[in-house]
């Protein structure tokens, strides 16, 4: 296992790759409201849709401030393409620092996300050009690996996870055409089955505060060894990614902690809010969606996923934590709580009534040869793993 090609910065082309004469490369300045508006508008109208084109991701400007400006972020990695004549932004690709540990090897890496080409400029080979150009700009910083995900299968996924959906507002999901009425069920019986309490029940549960950053960092750092691939996080990274950084406006990332009777933090859990635009629907314009993000619990620290007894304890713990995260999400008007089969999620997906979605998320690690990592699904049936078996993917991509 290891890098496929080894190069030095001297080998890297110094000038940008050539681009069609009517376009020009541009570096977005995400500290300028104007550029943030342009990025938001491009993705709002042209980013990924579900395969029936009923929903489109509706990233907010607050989301981009969180997702694209973590500690160590670089302007050169917010790469756009503009029409020379009009200045219109017609394509984008983003990269942020994201060092990884893969099977105990620490590698400098970036996370590539938000690749978007205007609908009218598809199949003009712009996407491969954006990938080549951002690779060049990352290489100039002596970084040679990149992690990215895709809903489509490309050569050799490192891992594949399956979508899980937990309805919090079943009626709205039904009216948007996302949830259907199973045979022998009525709308009333589905609403009854998916109703969750509006009170959290984990003792010691509370919202994460800035003073908790160091304790959450220690929990996360000790928890990572459960997985074969994880994101290396400094204390500043934890403050940004989990607490939400200085401009904590509480609209994107939500984190909670559990304090025991000696005021010791024993667990944390987080989710991010990323709505879908609902296209062509007479009644609904948006779907409120929360995505399970990072979590850690003392119940799983220093324990192997193969230890049946501690897995049972962890399962109980995680069910309580995720249940309460969903209670918080429901109180923030979230309609569906999404989670992948990654991390230790298969311990609770079925019991907490997550439905297995028909979507899969494939993980790719650029310029690194590595054996396949379990994504928490059975390779033959694609069902979520059972018998307390869990994935070995510890990285959550936005
Ligand atoms: C996307 C997504 C969806 C949906 O599409 C969806 N939920 C409710 C209705 N719909 C149509 O459901 C999920 C469950 C777990 C993790 C997920 O995503 C994990 C992170 C996604 N990364 C962004 C991305 C971009 C393009 C393609 N795939 C993923 C998702």
Image (cartoon, rainbow, N blue to C red):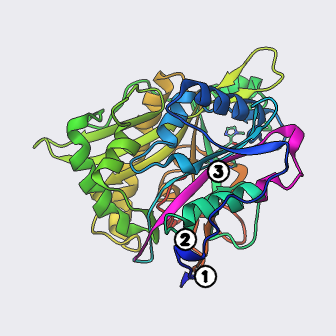
Looking at the image, residue 347 lies above or below residue 27 = below
User: Counting residues from the N terminus, which is met first, the one under dot 3 or under dot 2?
Assistant: 2
Determine which residue is flagged by label 1. 5
| Of residues 189 and 159, the one drawn nearer to the viewer in this rendering | 159
C-alpha separation, residue under disc 1 versus residue under disc 3: 33 Å
Determine which residue is flagged by label 2. 144
Was residue 108 drawn as part of the magenta stretch in this picture?
yes
In which quarter of the view is residue 320 placed?
A: top left
Q: Which residues are magenta?
A: 105-128
In what element is the residue under mark 3?
strand
User: Counting residues from the N terminus, which is met first, the one under dot 1 or under dot 3?
Assistant: 1
Of marks 1 and 3, the one in the foreground: 1
Q: Percent position (x, y) of residue 1?
A: 53, 85
In what element is the residue under mark 2?
loop
Pointers 1 and 3 in contact (CB under 8 A)?
A: no
Pointers 1 and 2 in contact (CB under 8 A)?
A: yes
Quarter of the displayed picture in which ligand 1 can be seen: top right
C-alpha separation, residue under disc 3 versus residue under disc 2: 29 Å
Q: Percent position (x, y) of residue 296?
A: 34, 53
User: Counting residues from the N terminus, which is met first, the one under dot 1 or under dot 2?
Assistant: 1
Asked if the beta carbon under badge 3 is closer than 8 A to the nearest atom of ligand 1, the reply is yes
Of marks 3 and 2, the one in the foreground: 2
Determine which residue is flagged by label 3. 163
In what element is the residue under mark 1?
loop
Was residue 251 drawn as part of the magenta stretch in this picture?
no
In which quarter of the view is residue 51 placed?
A: top right
């Amino acid at each position: 296992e290891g890098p496929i090609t080894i190069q030095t910065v001297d080998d890297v082309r110094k000038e940008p790759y050539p681009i069609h004469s009517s376009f020009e490369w541009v570096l977005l300045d995400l500290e300028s409201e104007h550029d943030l508006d342009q990025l938001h508008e491009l993705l709002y109208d042209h980013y990924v849709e579900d395969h029936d084109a009923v929903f489109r991701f509706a990233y907010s400007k607050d989301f981009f401030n969180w997702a694209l400006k973590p500690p160590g972020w670089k302007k050169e990695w917010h790469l756009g393409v503009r029409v020379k004549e009009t200045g219109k932004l017609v394509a984008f690709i983003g990269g942020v620092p994201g060092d990884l540990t893969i099977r105990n090897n620490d590698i400098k890496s970036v996370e590539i996300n938000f690749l978007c080409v205007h609908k009218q400029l598809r199949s003009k080979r712009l996407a491969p050009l954006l990938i080549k150009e951002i690779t060049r700009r990352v290489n100039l910083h002596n970084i040679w690996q990149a992690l990215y995900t895709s809903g489509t299968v490309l050569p050799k996924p490192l891992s594949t996870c399956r979508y899980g959906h937990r309805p919090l507002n079943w009626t709205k999901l039904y009216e948007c055409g996302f949830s259907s009425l199973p045979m022998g069920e009525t709308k009333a019986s589905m609403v009854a089955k998916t109703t969750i309490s509006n009170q959290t029940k984990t003792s010691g549960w509370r919202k994460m505060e800035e003073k908790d950053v160091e304790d959450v960092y220690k929990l996360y750092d000790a928890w990572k060894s459960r997985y074969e691939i994880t994101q290396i996080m400094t204390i500043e990274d934890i403050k940004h990614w989990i607490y939400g950084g200085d401009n904590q406006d509480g609209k994107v990332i939500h984190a909670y902690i559990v304090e025991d009777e000696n005021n010791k933090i024993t667990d944390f859990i987080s989710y991010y809010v990323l709505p879908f635009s609902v296209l062509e629907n007479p009644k609904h314009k948006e779907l409120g969606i929360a995505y399970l993000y990072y979590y850690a619990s003392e119940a799983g620290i220093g324990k192997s996923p193969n230890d049946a007894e501690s897995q049972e304890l962890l399962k109980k713990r995680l069910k309580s934590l995720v249940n309460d995260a969903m209670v918080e999400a429901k109180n923030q008007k979230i309609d569906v709580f999404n989670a992948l089969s990654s991390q230790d999620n298969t311990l609770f997906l079925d019991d907490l009534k997550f439905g297995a979605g028909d979507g899969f998320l494939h993980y790719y690690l650029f310029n690194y040869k590595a054996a396949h990592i379990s994504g928490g699904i059975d390779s033959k049936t694609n069902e979520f793993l059972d018998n307390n078996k869990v994935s070995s993917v510890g990285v959550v991509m936005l």
